[in-house]
Amino acid sequence: MSNDQQQDLAERVSEPIVPPQVAKDIGVLEQQFIRAEVEQLRQSIVSFRPLFEKRAKIVSHPEVQNNFWIRVLSNAPGEIDEYITSSDAAILGSSLSNLTVERFEVNEKGEGEPRSVRFIFEFNTGESNPFFEDKKLVKDFYWRKQVLTTPSGKKRTWDGLVSEPVRINWKKDMDVTKGLLDATCDLYEAEKKGGDRKELPEFKKLIEKLAVIEAIDEEEDEEDDDPMGGSSGQSFFNFFGYRGGDVTAEQSAAATKEENEKLEKILKGENVEDDEADDDEDVDDDFDQIESFPDGPELANALADDLWPNALKYYVQSFDDTPDFDFDEIDDEDEEDEEDDESHPRKKTKV
């Protein structure tokens, strides 16, 4: 290969950006892939519903029902397990009685938004649950789309899961969220009454609560001798406080219509003005300041797309993972090692 050819090849390989037309074509094709994937999910929901109903009958068997979901969670994948602290494990392990996941916006004909998802957690009550009063906690996630305008007048499309915070009626001194979930719910309820969010006293209280909890988590991380044995620092029950954004169904429908019309024009070969904002151009949004559980979508997707459909697999595996030794035989060893355990506490305990 000549020097000129080598230089030409090097220049092509080191091209700093994707050619504009290629980038545009890739973007259009990605939109088509997303449409196909969403349609595939929509149809699979209808197909799987009768199978989940059959599974529910199996789980309702007296010998299975009492600990089915506890065993499933005890064998949960890392994407879920990392959010379950030792305190969360104590609650889930003793009080959780059932879990249901529903794609509630898809009807029996397979019509509707398949990415919206509902989680129904059922718990024991009374003395069987010393942590909170609620028998059922329902958390709805809505898939929404929004067209935002940047300071320069350009447009940016955002889509994702939004939700309303769900309050938990904790018993005295049992709030494992350290008041963060209550503060999140207080602000949301104050916002519904009207007024500028940042001017509300509940906004300031939530910001202060987030700062305090962040400082506590950082201190605990520094004291933890086992970096691989810890959790994310967030209680699983802060999941019920996730919001994501304020996007109504009407706003989402309008944004979806606008995007679909634009895509159809492109597919027909029509010229469409590129008014999309650059990736480095920010949109003014204060939700990052008040989001009490930023990883809400990730945990929701892990629960809905992995734990829920694969629950039987995790249940069976929980028996395979059970240690085949008698706990009574190691009682004496536990007592001898108690002092060491206290000096090196595990930050994470399985359900």
Image (tube, rainbow, N blue to C red):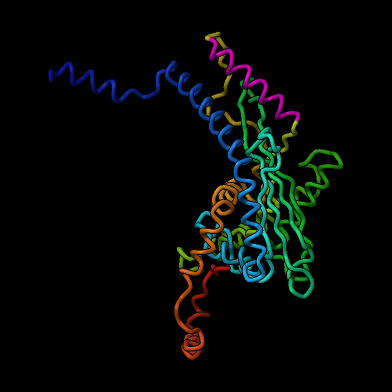
Q: Quadrant of the C terminus?
A: bottom right
x then y, percent, for residue 113: 66, 35
| Image vertical order of residue 299 relative to residue 257, above or below | below
x then y, percent, for residue 172: 78, 71
The reply to whether the magenta stretch includes residue 116 is: no
Residue closest to the far left: 2
Report which quarter residue 171 is drawn in.
bottom right
Left or right of 201? Residue 293 is left
Residue 82 makes an appearance in the image: no
Residue 133 makes an appearance in the image: yes
Q: How many numbered discs?
A: 0
- Residue shown at 23%/21% (left/top)? 9
x then y, percent, for residue 94: 66, 71
Q: Which residues are magenta?
A: 250-268
Left or right of 40? Residue 7 is left
x then y, percent, for residue 151: 64, 24
- Residue shown at 78%/48% (left/top)? 187
- Residue shown at 24%/23% (left/top)? 10
Q: Observer-nearest residue: 323 or 172? A: 323
Residue closest to the far top: 270
Left or right of 18? Residue 178 is right
Q: Observer-nearest residue: 347 or 219? A: 347
- Residue shown at 72%/56% (left/top)? 181
The reply to whether the magenta stretch includes residue 257 is: yes
| Image vertical order of residue 133 relative to residue 251, above or below | below
Residue closest to the far right: 193
Report which quarter residue 232 is drawn in.
bottom right
Report which quarter residue 153 is drawn in.
top right
Q: Quadrant of the N terminus?
A: top left
Left or right of 156? Residue 21 is left
| Image vertical order of residue 301 relative to residue 327, above or below | above
Q: Main secondary structure of the magenta part?
A: helix
